[in-house]
């Protein structure tokens, strides 16, 4: 019974799925390679516009300073006291640069203090800006 | 001829591919969801490094960022473009340390833009400092 059915409709043997699997594998490998596991600060800041900006390292510790002078890492408000222990802990796992996303309306003194705190923990600090 | 071949194959039990494909799809979706494309531009804040020989140490050029978008140099208010002009007037601007003092209440955006201006003028060592 089964055999006769098979011979009757040879065109309906089943869709060839191997190209699909190939494609999915290629996509998978692309995303594995492209994946950068960084914690985003989780807040939007208005970066100041600068002309001498360079591309910054993708694998970084991203810390945001909002216009209300809150300091965010990974979606949490960590406060200025939390910066040094956080950076020290993260640098112990892996040596990464720190990118500070400072809002252009944030308090300058808080920003300078944040940079100092991050440096005391042993990090190098870059400031994120917008290219015009 | 074809029929017999099919029969032999079906007896030899084909490998079941669907769980593999399912798993690969799940991995793919996981990586698509978790991938964040960090694309930050900006610049690194220079670490203040001690001078090799004390006699080579240069007196830094200091700018003060005050509230209401005022940049001061030697007590005079200069505009944002004045930062670059002042540094260009210095004889050896590449080795010249630049300090950007941030007064309480000043905006961080202006401090970052002043640092950008100093970098435009060719200064290599630019640092932030707090004004007590």
Image: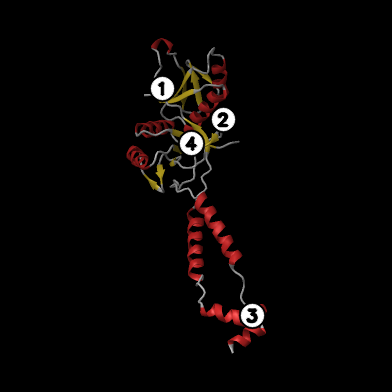
State the separation of the CA atoms marked 2 and 4: 20 Å
State the separation of the CA atoms marked 1 and 4: 29 Å
Contact (Cβ within 8 Å) of mark 2 with mark 1: no
**Looking at the image, residue B119 lies above or below residue A100:** above
**Looking at the image, residue B50 lies above or below residue A102:** above
State the separation of the CA atoms marked 3 and 2: 70 Å
Say whether residue A12 is visible: yes
**Which residue bears the numbered disc 2?**
A52
Nearer the N terminus, badge 1 or badge 3?
3
Q: Chain of mark 1?
A: B
Contact (Cβ within 8 Å) of mark 2 with mark 4: no
Q: Answer few, some or many: residues within 10 Å of disc 3's Cα (few below 14, many 20 plus, some between 14 and 19).
A: few
Furthest toward the top, the residue is B55
Q: Are marks 3 and 2 on the same chain?
A: no
Q: Residue B77's spot in the image, x, y percent?
A: 52, 19
Q: Which mark is residue B49?
A: 1
Secondary structure beneath label 1:
loop
**Looking at the image, residue B33 lies above or below residue A100:** below
**Which residue bears the numbered disc 3?**
B2
**Which residue bears the numbered disc 4?**
A105
Q: Chain of mark 4?
A: A
State the separation of the CA atoms marked 1 and 3: 80 Å
Mark 3 against mark 4, which lies toward the viewer? 3
The quadrant holding residue A91 is: top left
Q: Nearer the viewer, residue A13 or B55?
A: A13
Secondary structure beneath label 2:
loop
């Amino acid at each position: 019974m089964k055999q006769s059915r098979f011979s009757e409709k040879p065109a309906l043997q089943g869709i060839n799925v191997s190209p699909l699997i190939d494609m999915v594998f290629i996509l998978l490998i692309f995303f594995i390679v492209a994946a950068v596991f960084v914690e985003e600060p989780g807040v939007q800041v208005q970066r100041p516009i600068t002309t001498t900006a360079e591309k910054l390292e993708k694998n970084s510790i991203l810390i945001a300073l909002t216009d209300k002078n809150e300091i965010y890492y990974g979606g949490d408000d960590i406060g200025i006291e939390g910066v040094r222990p956080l950076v020290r802990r993260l640098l112990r796992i892996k040596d990464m640069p720190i990118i500070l996303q400072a809002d252009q309306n944030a308090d300058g003194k808080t920003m300078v203090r944040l940079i100092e705190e991050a440096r005391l923990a042993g990090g190098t600090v870059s400031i994120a800006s917008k290219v015009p | 001829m074809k029929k017999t071949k099919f029969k032999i194959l079906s007896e030899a039990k084909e490998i079941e591919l669907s769980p593999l494909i399912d798993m690969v799809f799940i991995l793919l979706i996981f990586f698509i969801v978790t991938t964040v494309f960090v694309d930050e531009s900006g610049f690194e804040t220079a670490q203040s490094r001690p001078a090799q020989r004390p006699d080579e140490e240069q007196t830094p050029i200091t700018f003060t960022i005050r509230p209401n978008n005022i940049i001061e140099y030697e007590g005079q208010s200069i505009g944002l473009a004045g930062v670059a002009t002042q540094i260009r007037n210095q004889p050896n601007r590449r080795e010249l340390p630049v300090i950007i003092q941030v007064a309480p209440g000043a905006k961080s955006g202006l401090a970052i833009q002043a640092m950008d201006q100093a970098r435009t003028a060719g200064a290599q060592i630019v640092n932030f400092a707090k004004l007590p």
